[in-house]
Image: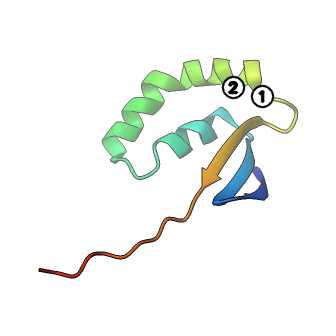
């Protein structure tokens, strides 16, 4: 995977190129239970591979992520 970042007002735009279809599922299943990950890989990988091949360039599949840092303060406890 390769990444490029660009600062935008209020956040960061990150352009990432996923190099394999498996990378798509790794991102989408991050933090999920192993049982769900296994199910998704078994049922979705063939379709993801087809879509990946249709849309990937020589660099990989382009994905744009937006990151915004939100901060605030809790009201005082009653």
- At x 69%, y 39%, the residue is 63
Task: Tell whether 69 sits left or right of 29.
Answer: right
Q: Which residue is located at x 22 percent, y 82 percent?
A: 76
Colour scheme in the image?
rainbow
Residue 36: quadrant of the picture: top left
Query: Going 75% across and 23% down the picture, which residue do you hit?
Result: 55
Q: In the figure, is residue 63 to the left or right of 30?
A: right
- Where in the figure is residue 6, as x and y percent of width and height? 78, 57
Which residue lies under the disc numbered 2? 52
Query: How far across and down, in percent of the image, does residue 22 sit?
Result: 60, 37
Q: Where, quadrant-wise, is the C terminus in this rendering?
A: bottom left
Which of these two is toward me, 11 or 47? 11
Task: Determine the CA span between mark 2 and mark 1.
Answer: 6 Å
Residue in the image at 45% along x and 43% along y: 29
Q: Is residue 2 above or below residue 28?
A: below
Q: From this viewpoint, which residue is outermost toward the right?
A: 58
**For the residue labelled by badge 1, is the local secondary structure a helix, a strand or a loop?**
loop
Indicate left or right for 3 with 30 as reference. Answer: right
Is 53 above or below relative to 39?
above
- Disc ID at residue 56: 1
Q: Look at the picture and state if 34 lies above or below 6.
A: above
Q: Are marks 2 and 1 in contact (CB under 8 Å)?
A: yes
Nearest to the observer: residue 5 or residue 57: 5
- Residue 61 x, y percent position in the rendering: 74, 34
**Residue 30 or residue 75, whichever sits in front:** 75
55 to the left or right of 59 = left
């Amino acid at each position: 995977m390769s990444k490029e970042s660009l600062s935008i007002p209020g956040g960061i735009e990150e352009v990432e190129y996923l190099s394999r279809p498996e990378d798509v599922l790794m991102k989408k299943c991050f933090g999920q239970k192993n049982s769900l990950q296994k199910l998704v890989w078994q049922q979705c990988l063939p379709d993801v591979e087809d879509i990946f091949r249709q849309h990937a360039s020589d660099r990989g599949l382009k994905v744009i992520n937006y990151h915004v840092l939100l901060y605030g303060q809790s009201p005082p406890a009653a």
